[in-house]
Amino acid sequence: MNPSPGFLAWHAYRKLVLVCSLLAAFAPALPAQELSHLPYVPTPQVVVDEMLNLATVTADDVVIDLGSGDGRIVITAAKRFRAKGLGVDIDGKLVALSTRNANAEKVEDRAEFAERDMFKTDISGASVLTLYVMPDFMPKLRAKILTELRPGARVVAHDYDMGEWHPDRMVTLTVPEKIEANGTDKAYLYLWIVPAAIGGTWRIDFDAEKSGEEITVAFSQYFQKIDAVAERMRRPLPIQNPTLTGATVTFSIALGTTQYQFSGRVDGAKIEGTATTSSGKGLLKWRGTRVAKGS
């Protein structure tokens, strides 16, 4: 059976990706003029719109787009949501084009563009980070994201994931205009919410627990996925449904005959939050203090 034209186009595209990936593997060490020769493929506007929707962008957000091309992601965020944004690209001509586009759309007060190496760009101020970059860039950016972005920041990528860090959500779009450049009409969008570092053993101080018996919870963590075991006076406590979303951790513990649902915000080595019961007797304050880090 002869391969279809779509398959041949995709095969040709994969060859291009392979060649560019060999360059991308050494991207941080390449001079700027060499990085600027990597292929530029604009993101279709329908994909831009869905990326920003997936990130739930609002006027309170700061959007940073790495590899910003003609600036359409940052400009759309500024125009539709009145968010502030920064687009970073290694190609000075694209940066100049983006600036002109922002001026034309009258969002230059909220949309800034800079000629920079994305790997050397400070992204710590972003509440939303957007990416449409070569696939081999993604593992390098993953380490940067987890180090620099605050817990709760949202990351949205077009077409390429971050390997072992599984997305919190994935959306597939049918975009016919992608066929010519990409050999497929599918666009894959990935959302990650940057998790707080919660791994380790925590002492729980809980207003409802007046006996003075210490409660500890040990969290194991793999990106945003967590497990937990709890004990009181070295005896196991039933703990259920531990979840971590950004800096918010939730779990339930049975103390005697009462089931408590805990919710708290992780801030470094501290957690502060409230707990409720199924009887709805009101909010009870609790605090967590990390006494040992996870491995």
Image (cartoon, helix red, strand yellow):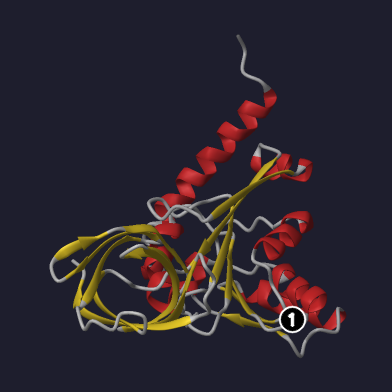
- Quadrant location of the C terminus in the rendered image: bottom left
Q: Position of residue 116 (x, y in %)?
A: 53, 79
Instruction: Judge whether residue 104 can be spotted in this image.
Output: yes
Q: Where is residue 105 in the image (x, y as percent from the top left)?
A: 86, 78
In this rendering, the answer to whether 225 lies above or below 1 is below
Q: Considering depth in this image, is 100 or 186 the residue closer to the camera?
A: 186
Q: Considering depth in this image, is 66 or 61 the residue closer to the camera?
A: 61
Residue found 69% across the figure and 25% down from its top: 5
In the picture of the structure, the residue carrying the numbered disc 1 is 99
Q: Considering depth in this image, is 213 or 51 the residue closer to the camera?
A: 213
Secondary element under disc 1, as helix, strand or loop, is helix
Find the residue positioned furthest to the left.
Answer: 234
* For residue 193, side relative to residue 249 (left or right): right
Q: In which quarter of the image is residue 128?
A: bottom right
In this rendering, the answer to whether 179 lies above or below 284 is above
Q: Where is residue 95 in the image (x, y as percent from the top left)?
A: 67, 77
* For residue 256, side relative to residue 61 (left or right): left
- Quadrant location of the N terminus in the rendered image: top right
Disc 1 residue type?
Thr
Instruction: Judge whether residue 268 can be spotted in this image.
Output: no
In this rendering, the answer to whether 171 lies above or below 8 is below
- Looking at the image, how many numbered discs can be counted on the residues? 1
Find the residue positioned furthest to the bottom.
Answer: 109
Find the residue positioned furthest to the top.
Answer: 1
Residue found 67% across the figure and 37% down from its top: 184
Neighbour tally class for label 1: few under 14, some 14-19, many 20 plus, Cα within 10 Å: many
Q: Where is residue 69 in the image (x, y as percent from the top left)?
A: 66, 67
Residue found 71% across the figure and 68% down from its top: 73
